[in-house]
Every structure is written in C-alpha cells, then in structure tokens.
Image: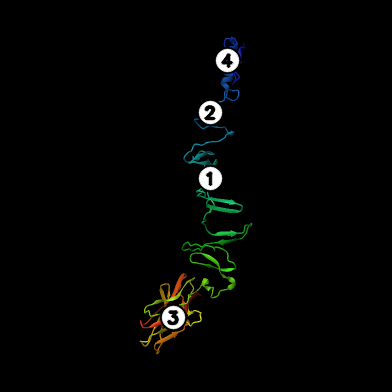
Amino acid sequence: MADTVTSPNMTLTVPVPSVAPGPLWAQSIYTCLYANIDQHNHSPGQGVQIQPSGINISSSLSFNNNSAISLKTTSYQDQGSSLSSSFLGAVYMAGGNLYFNAGSDGFAVQITNGHTVNGSSGTIGGLPSGTASANYAAGTFVFQSATNTAANIDGGSVLIRNTTASSNAITLSAPNALAANYPLVLPTGLPGAQSFVTLDNSGNLAAGSIPVANGITRANQAAVGQQVSASCGFFGGQATSPTDITNMSVTITTTGRPVIISVQPDGGSSSGFFDVNNNTITTAFLFLQLVRDSTVIAVWQLAPPHIANTVIVVPASLYFLDAGATAATHTYKMQYSVNAATSTAVISQCVIAAYEL
C-alpha cells in the first residue's frame, strides 16, 4: 500500500496512517498545513468553492475596480426615498422606481416613473395617465388622452409652417385682451363652390349658403348684416297700448356699427300702407314705435290735420338710424296703438328691414 494519497480538491499529499514512516509522515503534514492549507483561496485546485449559503456579507463589498460579469439579474431593496449625495455613482430603487446618483455630485436622477421611463425636467409631465400618450412617427406628433382618442392641447400662439427646411410660418393667436373663453368651430364640410363664410353667436363657422359668384344681393344679405321680416299681411287692431304687429320683427347680429331700420312694402302686388279711422271723433291717431330688444328707440304719431275719419301713410316714410346699437345680437320690432278704443288701425302688406352700415 502506498505511503501517501492525494486529496481530490487541493491535491494535498496526505500520509496514510500506519503505513507512512515517521519522517515522511511529519513532512507531509507540514507541507499540507503550511504550504497548502494556510495559503489556499478556494479557487479551482485551492479547495471547494464557497457556496452562497456560506457567505454573510455584513458590510460593503468591493470589487476592486473589477466588473461583475455573467449576472442574470440584479435585485434591489426599496430604499423608500432617494439616497444622499454621498452615494456617488449608485444605482438603486426608491419608492418603487429606479434611481442613479450622478458620479460628479451625487444628484439623484430618477430613471423610471411607474411603468415607463421617466422624462427629464422640461419633458411631458403627467404621464403615465391611463393610456394617454404623446408619440412621434412618420413626421407627425400624435397626442392622445386614451387609446385611439385625441387629446386637447392648451398653449399660446401656434406657428404653422410647410414641412420643408427653414420655411416661413403663419402665426395663429388669440386676441391680447380676451374677456372670456369662447369656441370657434370649423365648418362641417366644404361648400360646392367658393362661398362666403359666416360666424354665429355660438362660434360655429359655416360656408356654402352664399356663393361668391352671386355677390351681395338683397336675397342673400341676411347672412352678412341684413335681415328682412315676413309680411304682416292685412293687419288691423284697436289696441290703445303698444302692441306687436304680426311678423314685423327681425333679429340681426351686428359689429357695433349703426343700423338702418325701415318699414317698406313687402314687394307683393298689393299696396302697402298704414291707415287709421274713427267715425265717432274728429281726429284718429295712430302711434307706431320701434323697439330694440326691450328699449323703445323711436316713436311716430300719425294723424290727418283738418281731415276727419282717415289718414293713409306710405310705409317708406318710416325710417330710423340706430347709432346706439352695440356689437351684439339685437331684435327690432314694430308696435302700434290708437288714441281711442273706437279708432281702428290697419297696417297692410309691410315688412321691417334692418341692415348694418
């Protein structure tokens, strides 16, 4: 039998009890303890490699400027809040997000924000928020409040350019002095021909009702500053207090310039006139008044001097310049009354017209 055997992990020459002679025994033990066991480092051939269960790291572990390689993952203990600036170059988790402390001054840089990469200062805040997003693709920025749902944009003036290098811009701006918010809604579609664009008091733009080729005529001025009422027909009454005349009312939206109000024949084949008569008193009076919204702005008194029973007035003689109309939507109407319950007024085949100068 051999005097010694070789150990499998550190290749130690170990004397065999009851076989190795005294001097060899002592020399082998000395070599094993002093030259091999005392200097072993658990590297291959230097003892069994240390298992994780045999390690208890109780302080910071230095890699002596060497790389940690062949790692599958790294897992961090949540610190609750970012670490102090003394942790230069540290990567860690705080509040459920990944951080990096800058190597120059230890400034804590947040890398993630919930389920997305965190933007730096000056980038879009408020994201993530549900499925809201801001993306750029194929030359177009797309802002969405939810999946496939466009988002509103709130900002200052918008500069519109061609998609070519160094192109000039058109600037869309709100007025400097804007008393309140208001909408401006584009037309629902394109007109069949070049047309005037109108704007109603709800902010809706519309095009197509007045072709440019037709010009500005009485038939189409209603949409651009003129309104004409329907005919009053053959209207009669004996009211002694101001009373509306059937159909003689128009509504017009103005810009603040003076408004002309006139009463005129309706354009039909029958005569247009005002008439008042009374068979029981010497003189019959017809009073006509013009009302803007709820304010009386003009009054006419019609009576036949030295003529009993009747007076006929041509409607074109009723004409008024309203210089006090503000920029707004106004309703003008004609009212009548007579001087006695026995007087009868007739307003025949007339209209009221309003147009802004």
Report if residue 260 is visible in the image.
no
The residue to which callout 3 is attached is: 347
The residue to which callout 4 is attached is: 29
- Front-most of residues 107 and 159: 159
Q: Which of marks 2 and 4 is in front?
A: 2
Tag 3, which secondary structure? strand
Residue 79 lies, with reference to residue 230, above or below; the image says above
Q: Nearer the viewer, mark 1 or mark 3?
A: 3
Mark 2 or 3 closer to N-term? 2
Q: Residue 93: x and y, percent?
A: 50, 39
Contact between marks 1 and 4 (CB within 8 A): the answer is no
The residue to which callout 1 is attached is: 116
Q: Which of marks 2 and 3 is in front?
A: 3
Q: Residue 115: x and y, percent?
A: 52, 44
Would you identify the image quadrant in which residue 208 lies? bottom right
Q: Which mark is residue 69?
A: none
Q: In the image, what residue occupies the spot 55% across and 59% down?
A: 158
The residue to which callout 2 is attached is: 52
- Front-most of residues 204 and 230: 230
Q: How far apart are marks 2 and 1 (CA)?
A: 34 Å
Q: Residue 112: x and y, percent?
A: 52, 43
Q: In the image, what residue occupies the spot 41% across and 84% down?
A: 276
Report if residue 291 is visible in the image.
yes
* 83 on left or right of 16: left
Q: Distance between the residues labelled 3 and 4?
A: 140 Å
Mark 1 or 3 closer to N-term? 1
Would you identify the image quadrant in which residue 102 lies? top right
Tag 2, which secondary structure? helix
Q: Distance between the residues labelled 2 and 3?
A: 110 Å
Amino acid, disc 2: Pro
Tag 1, which secondary structure? strand
